[in-house]
Amino acid sequence: MRGAVLYGPRDVRFEERDAPRITKSTDAIIKISDTCVCGSDLWPYRGINPVTQPTPMGHEYCGIVEEVGSAVTSIKPGQFVIGSFFASDNTCPNCQIGYQSSCQHAEFVGGAQAPMLRVPLADGTLVVTRDVPSDDLIPSLLALSDVMGTGWFAADATNVKPGSTVAVVGDGAVGLLGVLSAKQMGAERIIAMSRHESRQKLAREFGATDIVTERGDEGVAHIKDLTDGIGADSVLECVGTQQSMTQAIHSTRRGGYLGYVGVPHGVELNGQELFYAHVHLHGGPAPVRRFLPKLIDLVWNGKINPGKVFDLALPLDQVAEGYRAMDERRAIKTLLRP
Amino acid sequence: MRGAVLYGPRDVRFEERDAPRITKSTDAIIKISDTCVCGSDLWPYRGINPVTQPTPMGHEYCGIVEEVGSAVTSIKPGQFVIGSFFASDNTCPNCQIGYQSSCQHAEFVGGAQAPMLRVPLADGTLVVTRDVPSDDLIPSLLALSDVMGTGWFAADATNVKPGSTVAVVGDGAVGLLGVLSAKQMGAERIIAMSRHESRQKLAREFGATDIVTERGDEGVAHIKDLTDGIGADSVLECVGTQQSMTQAIHSTRRGGYLGYVGVPHGVELNGQELFYAHVHLHGGPAPVRRFLPKLIDLVWNGKINPGKVFDLALPLDQVAEGYRAMDERRAIKTLLRP
């Protein structure tokens, strides 16, 4: 089969790879319905994370089970499934309290930008939909595999509840779906920070009530202006840079909540500054598995349509263009069809 | 009157000072029943925080109201009152959600190691007891002014609940009262980190079920041993150094809670390490005012006896010896009687 392999900065190739096989009795092989490019794929694509060897790319997936290992009991060939980018057994102590991305047996799922994928720990990782979905549902179900689950975690980690004032730092797909998540949780006011018109438009569609275009101290000042000088109850940090984190801390009200879900790159937090900021801080790799059953229901029942973040759809063999479009911010998120 | 004034490292003097007067209509003057030396007083005493000018010391107090300003309505002369080290109006948005130590009009209360004290924002800051307490209750009521409220905040910030496994980093008065707080909140297992016999004894008396004497990586390993390799649900960091914070992060289970209440000195947190640690982090100057009514009830009804942390009681004129004893760790906490 042919799949996406990253060789170095801005060098992603669509090339022949071995088709995945069952290697452990707990594996499943799935036939990918749709896959996509993640904002985090851009870290190595841009050379910010080093690429030490040719690396099969992609970790967002949904599709039809093709084959399962001998120890797999709850997943069967022919079922439509969605899983997280972290495989998890869903039984260890960390999984049991809802932190499946810190599963004691967690494995990163890689190489999903391909027609077929091996998923480890299939019973714990994959969630089966009630039926094989119609084609129009697939982009939204695919989004649950990472970006929607991650945006939801950011909102969940910041205690968003009916009436909350929420600010979202970052207008990538995760930030936009953070807006959607906050709206679902009943936030009354949702301030999206974005300077890109198409993203502002989608943020408003997802529930943003205010847009702040400034960054840094000016962005913070604008958020303070909008909140009687207090700051937001909940701030979702969906980027992962020092600037975005600092902006998020300063935008959070005393006693408020800050959720950070972008992998931090070069971020250092000063203990004393954080102490006097008086914020609740929580984040990490989103435990998407925890949220999948609920989010699948919301998509299936037409309550949310996170697939709207895909503003570019390409055949899988044009994966290189999919990365370029996101790198140049021409696309919010690229859907890839095998 | 005579009170304690810090001139420089290890140079605390008991000397003549102006008696406090009402300077704002919202002030109260109280006659101090008992006061004490705080662990945080040792930062400037040891020269770690610079002392730029002679500084009246002490911020823990309780006593009888002597006089109130013309705008004070709820506090009356003759009442016995306790207040926090941060004066607060108790009406601003930060106060209303329970973060009185971040009150928009917060003022630090200083100079309490003296017979008389001016307390700003008296209506918002001071809590009146139902009667004038008997002498034996006073040490425990005094402890509520800071250390007990701070230990309680650490436990509250870490979501301690019935059945929790808790670890406490730091065996100063705050750490020991963190143990007591966790016990009150129903923790099943409380691991105190201490290498001092007298403190271990008090920790056990307050509810500790296990003692860990190792520090750093060895301390973390011991806590992991005691918790099936998972770490504690809730970790109370009651010191404020890089070592204690790192130890606390590594001792917390994934998805667990870390509360830090010692003012961080030279602490830097690596964003990526914190991200993958998957902890909830919350701390800051304890909003003692939030907890005072409940804690006063617990003391009054004999449910808790936080005054046990005072293992040295001196007349106020021996304040210098009170500091020395704590600096040399001969005393856990020094009570001072005017």
Image (tube, coloured by chain):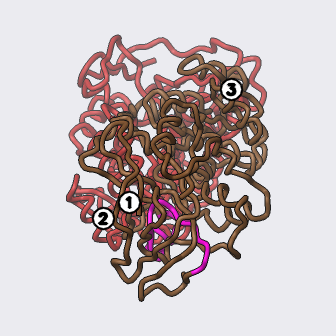
Chain colours: A brown, B red
**Which of the two labelled residues, at mark 2 and mark 1, occupies the earlier sequence position?**
1
* Discs 3/2, front: 3
- Judge by depth and name the residue closer to the eye, A25 or A132: A132
Inspect the magenta stretch and tell me whether residue A283 lies in it. no
Q: Is the Cβ of the residue at disc 2 closer than 8 Å to that at disc 1?
A: yes
Which residue is the site of mark 1?
B167
Which residue is the site of mark 3?
A197
Amino acid under disc 2: Ile
What segment carries the magenta color?
Answer: A78-100
The answer for which chain carries disc 1 is: B
Crowding at mark 1 (Cα within 10 Å: few <14, some 14-19, many 20+): many
Amino acid under disc 1: Ala
Residue A283 drawn at (x, y percent): 49, 48
Which residue is the site of mark 2?
B223
Inspect the magenta stretch and tell me whether residue A92 lies in it. yes
Name the residue located 58 percent from the left edge and 49 percent from the top edge.
A335
Name the residue located 51 percent from the left edge and 87 percent from the top edge.
A73
The answer for which chain carries disc 2 is: B
Considering only vertical position in the picture, is B112 above or below B187? above
* Discs 3/1, front: 3
